[in-house]
């Protein structure tokens, strides 16, 4: 019998938990249409002093909770992408730790009026990620709900280096699971799974860059994948069953990577994914 999705009791987001994402897109209007149609999001635009326009996506309508943000891609030479942000208590201390462990600071800690305080970093393998503290919009509580992010996953080639780096930055514990000869890593804080990691082995194209990818909870994975195709997305991994539910991977019409999943059970702030999704 299929187990119905369950939402956990509210828990206080701890440092190291994911809870905010934003999209850098070369065609924001096209991306806005795609995500609003696919997930039923509403959007509005903030004008942030010294920064410019920033689109906020909410669940339902303008009064709904914010689930993601979007900005125009600053450099056309860069690929469109979602950036996953993780909660920290002290931005500057975290950025200093990132640098000490071999990462880089791309955008220094900055307070964005109306949004929150954020910094953009890069790990030693060249993967972008963000760190943030709660603000007016970034509350780190709107996860594990239908049509919101429910999982963040790192695909990289040097998993040992990733374990060292992210464990040092966020205090994550890496717990490996064997799945028919493949290994999938769960990032954990205490008893909670907060994200995952998959090794980019020789099944992945050699030119494919390592990356973080967000998973969004949908009520019907097959229907959502079909709708994404209708809206101009490219489904790279067709809907398939894995331990925590039914998932698919895709790119939006501008090329940004994302995944969708219809979960069976939610474990704390994230899904307990038990199998690697494999290359695109």
Image (cartoon, rainbow, N blue to C red):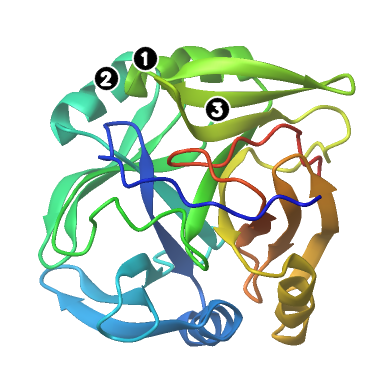
SS at badge 3: loop
**Element type at marker 2?**
helix
Which residue occupies the foreground of this view, 47 or 1?
Answer: 1
Residue 144 rendering spot, x and y as whole percentages: 46, 54
Secondary structure at badge 1 equals helix
Question: Is residue 144 left or right of 116 when viewed as pictured?
Answer: right
Which of the two discs, 2 and 1, labels the residue nearer the N terminus?
2
C-alpha distance separating marks 2 and 1 = 8 Å
Task: From the image, state whether disc 3 or disc 1 is nearer to you.
Answer: 1
- Which numbered marker is on residue 125? 3
Residue at image position (27%, 19%) is 97
Residue of label 1: 168
Can you tell which quarter of the image residue 60 is in? bottom left
Q: How many angstroms separate mark 3 from mark 1 (CA)? A: 15 Å
Left-right relation of 235 to 157: right
- x and y percentages locating residue 256 in the rendered image: 60, 63
Residues tagged 2 and 1 counted as in contact (Cβ below 8 A): yes
Q: Identify the residue at image location x=15%, y=31%.
A: 92
Residue 187 percent across, percent down from the top left: 51, 25
Residue 280 shows in the view: no
Give the Cα distance between marks 2 and 3: 16 Å
**Mark closer to the chain start, 2 or 3:** 2
Mark closer to the chain start, 3 or 1: 3
- Which mark lies nearer to you, 2 or 3? 2
Q: Which residue is mark 2?
A: 97
């Amino acid at each position: 019998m299929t187990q119905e999705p369950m939402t956990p009791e509210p828990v206080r987001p701890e440092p190291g938990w994911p809870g905010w994402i934003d999209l850098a897109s070369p065609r924001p209007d096209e991306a806005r249409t795609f995500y609003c149609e696919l997930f039923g999001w509403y959007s509005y635009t903030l004008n942030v002093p010294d920064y410019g326009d920033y689109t906020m996506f909410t669940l339902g309508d303008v009064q709904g909770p914010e689930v993601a943000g979007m900005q125009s891609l600053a450099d056309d030479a860069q690929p469109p992408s979602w950036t996953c942000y993780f909660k920290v208590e002290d931005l500057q201390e975290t950025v200093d730790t990132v640098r000490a462990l071999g990462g880089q600071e791309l955008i220094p800690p900055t307070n964005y009026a109306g949004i929150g305080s954020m910094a953009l970093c890069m790990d030693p393998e060249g993967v972008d990620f963000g760190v943030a503290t709660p603000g007016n919009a970034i509350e780190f509580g709107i996860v594990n709900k239908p049509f919101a992010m429910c999982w963040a996953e790192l695909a990289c080639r040097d998993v040992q280096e990733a374990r060292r780096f992210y464990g040092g930055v966020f205090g994550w514990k890496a717990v490996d699971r064997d799945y028919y000869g493949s290994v999938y890593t769960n990032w954990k804080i205490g008893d909670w799974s907060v994200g995952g990691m998959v090794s980019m082995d020789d099944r992945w194209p050699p030119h494919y860059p390592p990356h973080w990818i967000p998973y969004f909870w949908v009520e019907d994975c097959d229907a959502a994948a079909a709708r994404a195709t209708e809206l101009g997305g490219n489904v790279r991994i067709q809907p398939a069953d894995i331990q925590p539910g039914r998932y698919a991977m895709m790119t939006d019409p501008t090329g940004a990577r994302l995944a969708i999943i219809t979960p069976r059970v939610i474990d704390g702030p994230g899904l307990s994914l038990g199998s690697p999704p494999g290359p695109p």
